[in-house]
Image: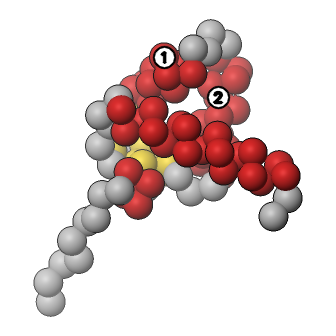
Amino acid sequence: MYPQRKRFDARAKVVVEILVQAGLSHQAPMDAIWSAIRRGLGLTRSERIREIVETMHACGFITTTDNPTVWAIHPDVLGIRIPEEEE
């Protein structure tokens, strides 16, 4: 594994823990995700928060929904198991 990937994996775990501690469910308003990251990491620059969110999105940790202001946090990231529909 490349060193940059290891660093991102470690950072992603920190961000995921921040989202969990903020009590965000598998779907959350984008503002809530930004606020949790801002508070959890003590960031003040929106550009840095945007970079983190875009990286998390590129890796599939968070995705867009039909509502552009609500993003989905991948259930596996939060440790949530969504039951499969019964046939």
Percent position (x, y) of residue 12?
A: 60, 44
Task: Identify whether 70 is placed above or below 26.
Answer: above
Q: Is residue 70 visible?
A: no
Of callouts 1 and 2, the N-terminal one:
1
Viewer-proximal residue, 11 or 65? 11
Q: Secondary structure at mark 1?
A: helix
Few, some or many residues within 10 Å of mark 1 (<14, 14–19, 20+): few
Percent position (x, y) of residue 18?
A: 45, 32
Q: Secondary structure at mark 2?
A: helix
Q: Name the disc covering residue 67, or none.
A: none
The residue at the far top in this view is 44
**Disc 1 residue type (three-letter):** Arg
Viewer-proximal residue, 39 or 51? 39
User: In the rendered image, which residue does mark 1 sit on?
Assistant: 39
**Disc 2 residue type (three-letter):** Arg
For the C terminus, the quadrant is bottom left
Q: Residue at x 85, y 58 (%)?
A: 2
Give the colour scheme shown. secondary structure
The residue at the far bottom in this view is 87
User: In the rendered image, which residue does mark 2 sit on?
Assistant: 50
